[in-house]
Image (cartoon, rainbow, N blue to C red):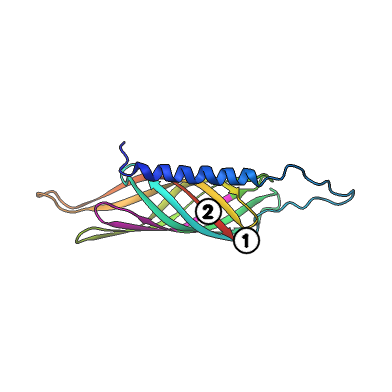
Amino acid sequence: MKMRHPWLLAVIASIVMMMGVDAQAQVEPDEEEEPDGVEEVVDIDQDRTTIGPFLGYDFDEIDEGFIGVDARVYFHMFDFVPGLSLVFNPAFNYYFMTDGSMIQIDANGLLRLDLDVPVAPFGGLGMAFNRRTFADDADLSLTINPFIFGVDFELGDALGGFVQFRGTRHTQSVPEIEGEPATTMTFTTVAFMGGVHLRF
């Protein structure tokens, strides 16, 4: 598998590494002990909203880089599992296609587990709306993101970062060629994404 834009994946990896170094630098070396009888309050992202930009690369048949905006709304609904949150995750993706353009709008549902450390894993699935344009044609499709998994990490009181993998089921129309009837092709791609979030 040959990537058309290998430099973009290197940029994503560099940004993620820099964000990880910043997060480690902000960890306080000593923690003050709580007075007797006072319980430490665990700060988790419950009932909060985050939004921010990201970069990504979609492998396999797409094999292109993309940029976008990712938002997350947290709902702490599971008292039987402390730190487990339900997350509504809409996202907008714009692809740099060599033979046209493509946008993807996601509506995902995630489960995020806060472990009281600077890193929190999450996973889920969702729906995706794709619009791909060519020279004189366009494809529209409503499909699924069958899997999403990754981690959030802390960069400060109001800033966080994330990296994730996302699978998307694509549907593409194939026109009639040399007497062959028109048909529809389906395939699944895997994208790697990394970005930052501002908390509100």
Instruction: Tell me where residue 103 appears, x and y as whole percent.
Output: 35, 58
User: Is residue 18 toward the left or the right of residue 93 in the image?
Assistant: right
Query: Can you identify the residue that label 2 sits on?
Result: 196
Asked if disc 2 and disc 1 are in contact, CB closer than 8 Å, the reply is no
Q: Which quadrant of the figure contains the N terminus?
A: top left
Residue in view at x 50 percent, y 51 percent: 195
Identify the residue at image location x=29%, y=57%: 101
* Residue occupying the far left of the picture: 178
Secondary structure of the residue carrying tag 2 is strand
The answer to which of marks 2 and 1 sits earlier in the sequence is 1
Q: Mark 1 is on which residue type?
A: Arg
What is the number of the mark on residue 4?
none
Q: Please say whether residue 71 is visible from this viewpoint.
A: no
Secondary structure that dominates the magenta span: strand
**Image quadrant occupied by the C terminus:** bottom right
In the rendered image, residue 137 lying in the magenta stretch gets the answer no
Report x, y in % for residue 189: 37, 45
Look at 73% across and 51% down and name the residue there: 42
Q: Residue furthest top?
A: 1
The residue carrying mark 1 is 48
Q: Residue furthest bottom?
A: 200
- Front disc: 2 or 1: 2
Q: Nearer the viewer, residue 106 or 126?
A: 106
Which range of residues does the magenta coloring cover? 92-111
Label 1 sits on a secondary structure element that is loop
Q: Residue 70: x, y in percent?
A: 49, 57
Q: Label 2 to label 1, Cα distance in Å?
A: 15 Å
At horizontal 89% and vertical 50% (from top left) the residue drawn is 37
Q: Residues within 10 Å of mark 2 (few under 14, many from 20)?
A: many
Alpha-carbon neighbours of circle 1 within 10 Å: few (<14), some, or many (≥20)? some
In the image, 22 versus 146, the foreground residue is 22
